[in-house]
Amino acid sequence: MLEKKSLELLSQAVARLDAGFSALPDFEALVAGSDAMGAVLEHVTERLRDNYPYFHPLYAGQMLKPPHPIARAAYALATWINPNNHALDGGRASSALEKEAVAEIAAMFGWKIHLGHLTSGGTMANLEALWVAGQLAPGKKIVASAQSHYTHERISGVLQLPFGKIAADARGRMDCAALEAGAAAGGIGCVVATLGTTGVGAVDPLPEILSLRERYGFRVHVDAAYGGYFTLAENLAEPARAAFDRIGEADSIVIDPHKHGLQPYGCGCVLFRDPEVGRFYRHDSPYTYFSSKELHLGEISLECSRAGAAATALWATQKLLPLTRGGEFAGALSSSRRAALRMAGLLRERGFVVPFEPELDIVVWAPREKSASAASEASQRIFDHAAAQGLHLALIQLPVSFFDAAWPGLEKDREHVLSLRSVLMKPEHEGWVNEIVDRVTSAVLRKRRR
């Protein structure tokens, strides 16, 4: 079931790469332990089989999406050179590829002028965005929705900036009335708007947040690490569409190509609308930045060594699948949302409680029981039974208030409901929704028989 065609293409590409250095004197690479490599790889293979089948559509749990074969092949190809995109001295070609690939991501959000680069992941990308926010408004508070990723609070602690949580509504979106109350009290330097929360895929109301920025003067950072590529999808509901249509008005944006961008871990990206924030990165290095007077990526990044292979893989993927609406890449995002909507509908038909329609491709639901505690226990049992029959889901603690509209008779004997969660981010998921829901139903029947 693992894709293998790219191995043949990779072998051919390595031969062509090798030929590009034919003018050099021959030498034999000194490979320590070469005689035992086969045995070690065999052992590695056995160890790696101790994994959930992340590549299979029956893995419908966490945010795990296989890299595109072109990304795997391009990444591996670059490792024969092993470029470092900190300075042009260590990654000349791959630095150029990074700049081009990042410019294409910025253009997806409508930015022709920007400052940005790749990072090791969304955490580092968000750290850089909030670091710049702190430089511009020293000592002022960073705020984010109560449903935002926990990394924002941790990053604020690292940066020694105060942090505040803004209440979320019953849909998991930032409550703008609560935000305005906080802004009116003063002291907010940056608001983090999440376009695609990792828990339920909620899209914060960016148009309203931008309106409040005009009144209160805070900076707006968009954490689109998970949901950013959905700006290309053609089937978003109106509130989400309105938010993505305004994303280019943010001051900074984070997106993770290693999620919906079809890249291997780790590949994040941070973008700034105003290139002048590059002044905060300026530093001197006595042993780098000498091979060229062009901008070295290390001069606009907090990270030093960064894998040029990641930039190579991203560039190749975007060359094969351009970031354009109506294209093949965008079509896969629309397919994922269709899969989520269909799964939500089927689950409701079979008696589960789906608290709200998926905004992106994440579905959350719970078995209908008398109380929050009983529903939580049933969710855990279904999760275990489903895994036993090859269906891998995820679990999430949701505020009991999320179920008010869809489950008015629920006995609220605890503050959270342990619920089931599926991320339908693979292109195959749309064709597997019926099978997934059938297996969930089977797990329920097994639970009842016991």
Image (spheres, helix red, strand yellow):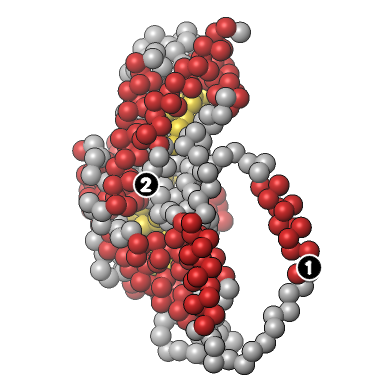
Q: Amino acid at mark 1?
A: Asp
The residue lying at 54 percent from left, 31 percent from top is 392
Q: CA distance from mark 2 to mark 1?
A: 46 Å
* Percent of width and height locating residue 25: 62, 92
**Are there few (<14), some (14-19), or many (20+) residues within 10 Å of tag 2?**
many
The residue lying at 75 percent from left, 69 percent from top is 34
Identify the secondary structure beneath mark 1.
helix
Note whether 164 is above or below 313 in the view shown: above
**Quarter where residue 387 is shown:** top right
Identify the secondary structure beneath mark 2.
loop
* Percent of width and height locating residue 106: 31, 63
Horizontal side of 215 relative to 71 (left or right) equals left
Which residue does the numbered mark 2 point to in the structure image?
Answer: 227
Note whether 426 is above or below 23 in the view shown: above
**Quarter where residue 158 is shown:** bottom right
Horizontal side of 165 relative to 106 (left or right) equals right
* Percent of width and height locating residue 5: 48, 56
In this rendering, which labeled residue sits more in front, label 2 or label 1?
1
The residue lying at 36 percent from left, 12 percent from top is 408
The residue lying at 44 percent from left, 13 percent from top is 368
Note whether 207 is above or below 366 in the view shown: below
Which residue does the numbered mark 1 point to in the structure image?
Answer: 35
Q: Amino acid at mark 2?
A: Gly
Q: Earlier in the sequence, mark 2 or mark 1?
A: 1
Q: Is residue 252 visible?
A: no
* Percent of width and height locating residue 46: 71, 47
